[in-house]
Image (cartoon, rainbow, N blue to C red):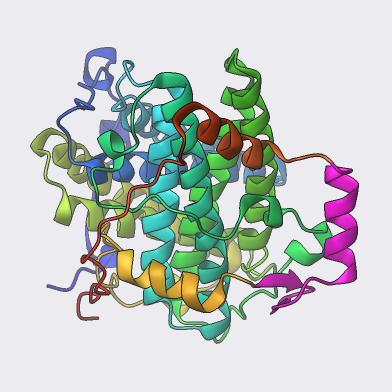
Amino acid sequence: MTFNPLEQRGIPLDRQLRTWRELDVEPIDPDHCDPYTRCRIITMNGIEVEAILFSHQMARHCPDPAVKRRLAQVRYMEAQQQKAVNWLLPGVSSVLETTIAYEQVAVDLTAWVARAEPDPYLAQAYRFGVLEDFDHLYRYANLYEMIEHRKAESIVDGLTEVMPGRPTPLHHRDPLDNVRDPYDKTTVNPLSKLHALTIMSAEQQTMNFYMNTGPTYMEPIARQLYQEIGLIEEEHVTHYESLVDPGETWWEQLVNHEYNECYLYHSFMEQESDPKVKAIWELHLNMELEHLRIACELMREHDGREPQEILAPELPNVLTFEPNKGYLRQLIADELDLTTLGAGYVREAHERFERMQQALNDGETTPSDRVLAMHREQFGREYRLETEGEHPVPSLRER
């Protein structure tokens, strides 16, 4: 069934304010929840954080007090949404358990987007990034067994394999080679805009999470691994944000943000297995419909254009969390040896890449490799979770 958010009425803004009791949501049970419920929560937290940060940046560049006040009104409701979503995560989960869930999000969200992306250049950018997130999951899983004596299987539940991707030490590139070419806003498929905004937001939230939680560990190897992968997340945010056309006006970007939130809340509401969480997705969708309506009004008033000029006429097929085992194994076989050069990709190390590697490592072993060495010394093996015989590429729902 088609769903056009521009034709829907949401909850009026003056009825969206929630009490403390309403914001005090019941967290999920980490031992019995669907792992993809947790993935949806982490994704929507990143989307809401991006919406808040974008609104703040827009306000800082806006000279019109009336627009600033309108942005502030909507932003407060977005902030309440972010608190409700993020507080669904249980306090009993350790930082490292949440980290593994973050990387499961990065793997299966980016893999799905890479498969669904209609633009070949953009799809390549997602394929390149997902092989690095795949290896991050592998390194954190080894760290998890070392310091918490539990297996990542308890978190990813076999939906996502834990095995080597592109080796983490090879992710450190000269910053010049992390900037991609942007899509052209006048010709790009509207779905591509949603994909770029979604993956950028998710990676940005991962970067922020590692920046803030990395030093909370006492174990030196954990602190070192978070520092290393945190720097790679900085590269990933640069990689993905550069895909967005910088010529989009503030008003276009505002409308795209609100439309994307409608798209994702609608998608997750359609597939959510937890009734309490599904009710939150439905509530937030109805709030976002009003936020989108307000953004469209601002665009008409200040940009002199109709939102229909830049948006899809209806929401695309729902974005789905699902296993991507066969797809990722094929990527490992086909594209593991890629690195970046300028805005493109090459299969052989080049002078800038080698210079960056030498300057960073200075003859020392990287934290990500030390994790594997320490795990082998402690257990006589590396931790892996491979599910033999379960590797067909899942078909995307009909678009």
Q: Percent position (x, y) of residue 382? A: 46, 41
Image location (x, y in percent) of residue 329: 40, 69
Residue 102 against residue 114 in the figure, above or below: above
User: How many numbered callouts?
Assistant: 0
- The answer to whether residue 301 is seen in the rendering is no
Closer to us: 171 or 289: 171
Residue in the picture at 59% in, 25% down: 222
Residue at x 57% of width, y 24% of height: 213
Measured from the top left, where is residue 90 in percent x and y?
Answer: 29, 21
Vertical order, 104 against 379 (above or below):
below
Residue 357 in sight in this render? yes
Answer above or below: position of 1 versus 136.
Answer: below
Q: Check if residue 215 falls in the magenta segment.
A: no
Of all residues, the one furthest to the front in this rendering is 380
Q: Which residues are magenta?
A: 338-363
Q: Nearer the viewer, residue 58 or 228?
A: 228
